[in-house]
Structures are given as C-alpha cells and as structure tokens.
Image: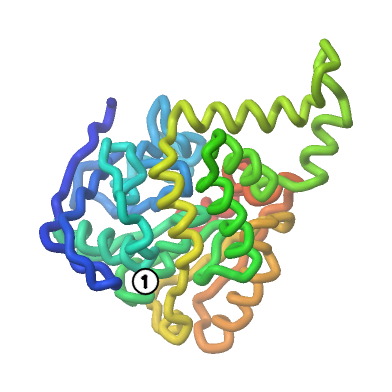
Amino acid sequence: MENPLQHIILKNFKLNSGKILDIHLAYQIFGQQLFSAPIILVNHALTGNSDVAGEKGWWKSLIGENKTIDTNRFTVICFNIPGNGFDGFFIDDFENFTTKDVASIFINGLNELKINKLFALIGGSIGGSIGWEMLSIKNDLAEKFIPIATDFKTSDWLHSQCLVQKFLLESDDKPLEKARIHAMLCYRTPESLNVRFKGEKLEDHSILKSHDWLNFHGKSLTERFSLKAYRLMNHLLMTINADENSLQNIEADIHLVSVDSDLFFPAFEIKKCFENLIKTKENTFYHEIKSIHGHDAFLMEYEQLNKILNTIIQ
C-alpha cells in the first residue's frame, strides 16, 4: 500500500450507550507531512475506506498531485469508520454505535495526532453526516466544511430505506448481495437506469441488462465487503442526529452540496437545511450537482464536483 494504514487504539472509550470498549482506529495520510501544510480530513462513504488517493483511491479523481485537492499543497487524512473491516477490525455489537459515537472517535483520533484545527472537513453521504456530528460537538474544528449529498439527520425516508436493508440483511439467502441490489436502486434513479439500459436484454435473451447490472453490483460487493461491516454501516445511517440547535454555532464556512436527483438524501432536504442556517449564519453556501444519476452522482459527476470544490478550496 503506497500510503500505509496507521493505527490508534482508544482505550476504554465510552459510547453514548454507556458501553466501554477499546476502539481500533485506522487511518491513512496522503500528501504533505503532517503539520507542514494545511490539513484536510476526508470522511468516507458507506462502503468506502481510508484509501482515498493513489492508484486504487476511490476519490482519486479529486485527490492527488495537481488535482482539486492537491496533495502537493495539502495533508489529507482519512479515518476508517471502526468496524468497516478495511483494517481487519469488526464490531459485533454494532447496535451500540451511533454516528455521534463515530464523530467522537474521529475527534479523539485527531486529538491523539495533536491536530486541533482542520483547513477543511469534507464528507460524502454518511461521511458528511459524521462531519455534521463532529462539528456539532466541536464547533471550531474546521475552517471549511463541505458535506456532499448528505444531511445532519436521518429522515423518515432514509430510515425506511435502511429498514428494508435491515430486513434483507437478516435473511438467510444471500443477504449482502440482496441488500446491495436494493441499495443500488436508492443510489440511482429511474431515468438513470432507463436511459442506460433501454429495456434491452442480454445477447442470450436470458434476463434484462439492468437485471444483470444489479446482479453484478450485488456479487461484487460480497467480494470486497463483509456482511458484519455492512450491517454496522446500515445501522449507522439510521442514527444520524446532529444537534440542530448547535449547527448555527459552527464556525466553519459551510458549503452544502446536493444532487438535484438524489433519492437517498434529497436535494430539497439539503436546501431546507441551507435556508434555515443562512438566517443566522452568513457564511453558509449552497451548491447543486445536476445529474440524472441520483445519489451516486457525487462519485460520478467529477467535472461538476471538481468545479464546485475548486471555488471553495483554492
């Protein structure tokens, strides 16, 4: 691994549930040596991990040498959500955990690294939600906060989708594969699938190409992610609950980024958050990605996202 995993052990960490345990927190650092350049913390999404840049980096279109998040200019850090399995660490009693716990763990990780201030905190999907929780706990943590395709709370719609995921994950027959297939329909849109596949079947006429595409995503996730980790991540999505009253106290410039067709974290919810914040917090801004691809557009529409981030980070 070009940028090796590093590890912090948080001894006797107390969760909001009251449970006390040792937390294994793994992270990677990219770009400039720590404390030699402005620091950007990137919080990964649901099945992501700390490997955000480099040859296999899942956000290498944004992060790297001479990229929008330029590793020649910045130090980039990414923690793994404990239990995501990227470092071989899993959590059995995942229902004891909340996104607020993860936020506290990340803040403790930064404290262990002697990092008191971030230039920017960026997170997509659940990573952005954890960012909201972090800043509601520590209002002065970052100069800039960029939550992408996410919100500070779990909506009824999101909770309902996660409930379906939970039912699928508790089944005996291919639980991870089936949950992923359902999730893909939350991450994309009817227009995205219909325009791409046009009702066409495979050459052998056995199944629709869209059916085959869903099967592919279901199977491919089982090859790189564990059922235990996915159950944890799905559970965390149901617990997002940053203190709404504390959001106006966040010192950072807040740049909310939505996707106009997002079915998972709808743009109208993110816009509502912006409209409420701007009443008392002038350094709040709203940006919108235009796409037919729904939630996953933040991983697909790199030209638009790069343009948005360039205006914020440069």
**Residue 121: % across, % down:** 39, 59
Q: How is the image coloured?
A: rainbow
Q: Is residue 270 above or below residue 214?
A: below
**Residue 169: % across, % down:** 52, 46
188 sits to left or right of 307: right
Between 130 and 278, the one lying in front of the other is: 130
Q: Secondary structure at mark 1?
A: helix
Quarter holding residue 139: bottom left
Identified at 59% across, 75% down, the residue is 274
Of the 4 image quadrants, the one containing the N terminus is top left
75 sits to left or right of 59: left
Residue identified by numbered label 1: 135
Between 63 and 244, the one lying in front of the other is: 244
Q: Is residue 252 above or below residue 92?
A: below
**Residue 17: % across, % down:** 29, 71
Between 72 and 266, the one lying in front of the other is: 266
Please tell me how crowded label 1 is: few (under 14), some (14-19), or many (20+) other residues with Cα within 10 Å: many
Identified at 35% across, 56% down, the residue is 94
Identified at 34% across, 54% down, the residue is 41
Residue at the left extreme, as displayed: 11
Three-letter code for the amino acid on which mark 1 is drawn: Leu
Q: Is residue 271 visible?
A: yes
Quarter holding residue 226: top left
